Image (spheres, rainbow, N blue to C red):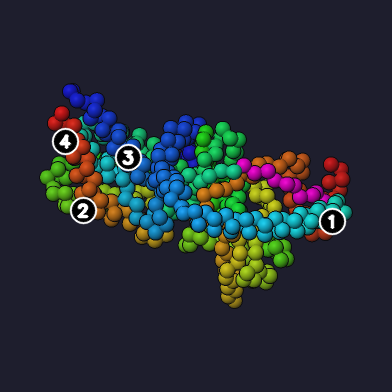
């Protein structure tokens, strides 16, 4: 056990056994799949028409928002170019499906149907339609385990989209669905309702994806840190479809690349690195 | 031994089914109460066929469960080996008991397994529960023990009759 935990000697055995385990997951997932298939067969025409209309409406709204977002992205990139900083990269994604959840009630992990054969790598970021979901922690040939951001052993580097305050969002140990913001001193400006986005630090998650929304802030005098709770934007427990972020071109200056929002002197050094590049 | 091939395949099949039940997705409220199906099957076979299923087999089954659930290698192996050892020690007594008396001993055996794995999880800094809820599967396992017993005994007997 110690060998596995600390040195990773067992990775190959794990992969081989993981291959043997694949049919198990498939079988265990069967009831859910059959249920879903039956649900799809037994829908009435009106339900389908309703859904169709709703989806069309949603698509139109999303298109309109996308148009706006695109113009903003262009503008943003131009401004960043003016500042000589690196532009935002469009990220390619690989769709995947959740096929099981960890039977251990204390670890929040899910199994997805993409594995080493599909080019999944350890540490790959996983997104959901509404926000950040987690990262890949263990790869098997045809499936892999994803550690969710709500796991108590997982911290997500975030920043407040309103003002750029940074924090670490750690999965709460006493709530299934919430995050604790750690080491936030009481004077930091974080309010209820603030939306937290990924800050891109830690080199695991891409920048600027929505992570969570602050639901409660408690600053008690005498405590060194404020107690802040946030709820993830991603439908961590009710979605089946996720996206794996394919790696963008690796920058040569990994540490500075994600720090475009730091202090002024750092910015100038960043700019020089960029122009040198 | 005559009929040992179908018998061995019954043992394998029972562990496969137990493994499936162990990773079957459950609704959110139920995941804390999932019975330790594999441990129940280990206890049954150790009590009834100790020449076929012992501590070694339990260990290997545990390794498979570890691979299946993605947990730390050896966590379930140690737990199930402990279960097998306890069941071996208590075997003669268990055979004399009625199925409900057995259930109370099963509660103790699986409780000890859960306690051991809780200690290991704390030792290796793995995610673990902070309340006594971690013992809940012992209660549900004991409740499901009569069912497991009847099913497994029925299957084993139908094989022996042929």
Q: Residues within 10 Å of mark 2 (few under 14, many from 20)?
A: some
Compute the Cα span from label 1 to label 2. 71 Å
Q: Quadrant of the C terminus of chain B?
A: top left
SS of the residue under disc 1 = helix
Query: What are the residue bounds of the magenta stretch?
Result: A85-94
Q: Which label lies toward us, 2 or 4?
A: 4
Q: Which residue corresponds to the image point at 63% horizontal and 65% vertical from the top-left?
A: A184
Q: Main secondary structure of the magenta part?
A: loop
Residue B17 numbered mark, or none: 3
For marks 4 and 3, the one nearer the N-term is 3
Residue A47 numbered mark, or none: none
Q: Is residue B111 visible?
A: no
Residue A137, position as x, y percentages in the image: 55, 43
Q: Which label lies toward us, 1 or 2?
A: 1
Residue identified by numbered label 1: A79
On whether disc 2 and disc 4 are found on a single subunit, the reply is yes
For marks 2 and 3, the one nearer the N-term is 3
Q: Which residue corresponds to the image point at 71% horizontal and 59% vertical from the top-left?
A: A65
Residue identified by numbered label 2: B104
Q: Mark 4 — on which chain does it sit?
A: B
On whether disc 1 and disc 2 are found on a single subunit, the reply is no
Residue furthest front as drawn: A45
Where B31 falls versus B37 (above or below)? below
Residue identified by numbered label 4: B157
Q: Is residue A271 visible?
A: yes
Q: Mark 2 — on which chain does it sit?
A: B
Compute the Cα span from label 4 to label 3. 18 Å
Question: Does the magenta segment cover residue B85?
Answer: no
Residue B82, position as x, y percentages in the image: 30, 42
């Amino acid at each position: 056990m110690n060998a596995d935990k600390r040195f990773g000697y067992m990775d190959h055995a794990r992969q081989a056994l993981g291959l043997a385990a694949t049919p198990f997951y498939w079988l265990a997932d069967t009831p859910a799949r059959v249920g879903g298939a039956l649900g799809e067969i037994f829908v009435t025409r009106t339900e389908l028409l309703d859904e169709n209309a709703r989806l069309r409406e949603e698509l139109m709204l999303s298109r309109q928002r996308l148009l706006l977002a695109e113009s903003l992205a262009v503008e943003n990139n131009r401004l960043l170019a003016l500042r000589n900083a690196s532009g935002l990269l469009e990220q390619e994604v690989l769709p995947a499906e959740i096929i099981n959840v960890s039977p251990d009630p204390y670890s929040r992990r899910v199994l997805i149907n993409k594995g080493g054969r599909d080019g999944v790598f350890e540490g790959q970021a996983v997104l959901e339609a509404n926000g950040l979901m987690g990262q890949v922690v263990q790869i098997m040939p045809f499936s892999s385990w994803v550690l969710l951001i709500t796991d108590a052993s997982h911290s997500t580097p975030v920043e407040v989209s309103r003002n750029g305050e940074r924090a670490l969002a750690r999965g709460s140990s006493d709530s299934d669905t919430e995050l604790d913001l750690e080491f936030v001193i009481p004077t930091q400006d974080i309010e209820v309702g603030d939306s937290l986005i990924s800050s891109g630090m830690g080199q695991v998650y891409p920048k600027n994806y929505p992570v969570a929304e602050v639901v409660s802030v408690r600053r008690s005098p005498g405590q060194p840190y404020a107690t802040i709770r946030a709820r993830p934007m991603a439908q961590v427990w009710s979605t089946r479809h996720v996206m794996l972020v394919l790696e963008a071109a690796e920058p040569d200056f990994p540490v500075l690349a994600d720090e475009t929002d730091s202090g002024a002197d750092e910015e100038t050094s960043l700019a020089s690195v960029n122009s040198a590049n | 031994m005559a009929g040992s091939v179908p018998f061995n395949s019954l043992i394998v099949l029972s562990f496969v089914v137990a493994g499936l039940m162990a990773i079957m997705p459950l609704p959110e409220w139920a995941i804390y109460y999932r019975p330790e199906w594999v441990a129940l099957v280990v206890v049954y076979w150790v009590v009834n066929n100790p020449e076929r299923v012992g501590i070694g087999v339990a260990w290997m089954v545990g390794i498979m469960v570890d691979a299946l659930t993605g947990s730390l290698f050896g966590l379930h192996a140690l737990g199930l080996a402990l279960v097998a050892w306890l069941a071996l020690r208590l075997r003669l007594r268990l055979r004399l008991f009625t199925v409900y008396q057995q259930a109370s001993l099963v509660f103790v055996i699986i409780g000890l397994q859960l306690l051991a794995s809780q200690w290991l999880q704390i030792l290796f800094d793995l995610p673990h529960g902070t309340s006594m809820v971690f013992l809940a599967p012992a209660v549900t396992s004991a409740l499901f023990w009569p069912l497991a017993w009847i099913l497994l005994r029925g299957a084993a007997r139908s094989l022996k009759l042929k």
